[in-house]
Image (cartoon, helix red, strand yellow):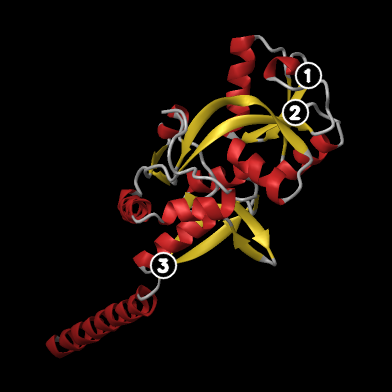
Amino acid sequence: MKKLLTLVTVVLLSVALAACGNSSDEKSKGSDEKVIKVGATGQSFPNAYQEDGKLVGYDVEVMNTIAKNLGYKVEWTTTDFSGLMGQLNSGRIDTVANAVAVTAEREKMYKFTDPYSYIGTQIVTSKDNKNVNQIEDLKGKTVAGVLGSNHVEKLQEYNTKNKMNLNIKTYETREGAMNDVELGRIDGYVNSGSVLSAEINKHDFKAKLVGKPIDEDATAFPFQKDNDELRGKVNTELKKLKEDGTLEKLSQKYFGTNTVESQTK
């Protein structure tokens, strides 16, 4: 009986050791490649868009540079903006690189890195629209924005505060809104002023800016609150890129202007 018990013990111990060994081997096989999962729309020029089948843009290049410096591989996910925030909420991605504005409401849900850009909320209208030249000219008219965008929220606040009586329409993508502005189907479209300027200058977007920006926000990378270690690593590298001038160079490359510093402070 004792011999039998001893034999059983040896077998069980061998199995346990083998299991531990296999687990360790599997871990070591994947431990050399660190991955950060990042979301972008792939339709947000010049922040995150497709060019020749490749995801490029200001936010994309900033994140890729940070990841490279940290020794991480970026695993990109592309979908609409509201879908990206949903995936961040569920933990399917680590962060979003798509001009995510830092707001009080979002700060209740996420922890943000330091800002890497500042964006003014700006309205444009068709270049051929002679009736709209300043904000007041849009009273009672239709102004559109992208569903889930912070610029739509800013427009709603501005509408209520200034009693503009706007008909605010939302689109799944910016392309639909921009197309309808050019065709005169809607009276205005709201987005980042720097993005709109880039569209007008580089993509011949047939639109004109209406008045001054109605607001300004900082943009940063949002992380779930329990992902503080990764956020801290990204933030450290982000500070370095700002200090050595890399962020400003990338801003000039994609926007044609310096968006790294606030324009209202």
Residue 140 image-quadrant placement: top right
Closer-to-camera residue (82/253): 253
* Marks 2 & 1, CB-CB < 8 Å contact: yes
Closer-to-camera residue (47/171): 47
Q: Specify whether 265 is left or right of 147.
A: left
For label 1, count other residues whose C-alpha is less than 10 Å away and answer few (under 14), some (14-19) or many (20+).
some
Could you tell me residue 49's position as x and y percent? Answer: 64, 55
CA separation, marks 1 and 3?
47 Å
Looking at the rendered image, the disc whose residue lies closer to the viewer, 3 or 2, is 2
Q: Specify whether 35 is left or right of 81.
A: left
For label 3, count other residues whose C-alpha is less than 10 Å away and answer few (under 14), some (14-19) or many (20+).
few
Residue holding disc 2: 188
Residue holding disc 3: 68
Image quarter where the C terminus lies is top left
CA separation, marks 3 and 2?
40 Å
Q: Is residue 260 above or below residue 152?
A: below
Could you tell me residue 167's position as x and y percent? Answer: 75, 20
Of the image marks 1 and 3, the number of the one nearer the N terminus? 3
Of the image marks 3 and 2, the number of the one nearer the N terminus? 3
Amino acid type, mark 2:
Gly
Closer-to-camera residue (230/236): 236
Question: Is residue 85 visible from the viewing direction of this image?
Answer: yes
Furthest toward the top, the residue is: 163
Question: Is residue 92 visible from the viewing direction of this image?
Answer: no
x 50%, y 47%: residue: 88
CA separation, marks 2 and 1?
8 Å
x 57%, y 49%: residue: 256
Q: Please tell me the numbered disc located at residue 141.
A: 1
Secondary structure found at label 1:
loop
Of the image marks 2 and 1, the number of the one nearer the N terminus? 1
Amino acid type, mark 3:
Lys
Image quarter where the N terminus lies is bottom left
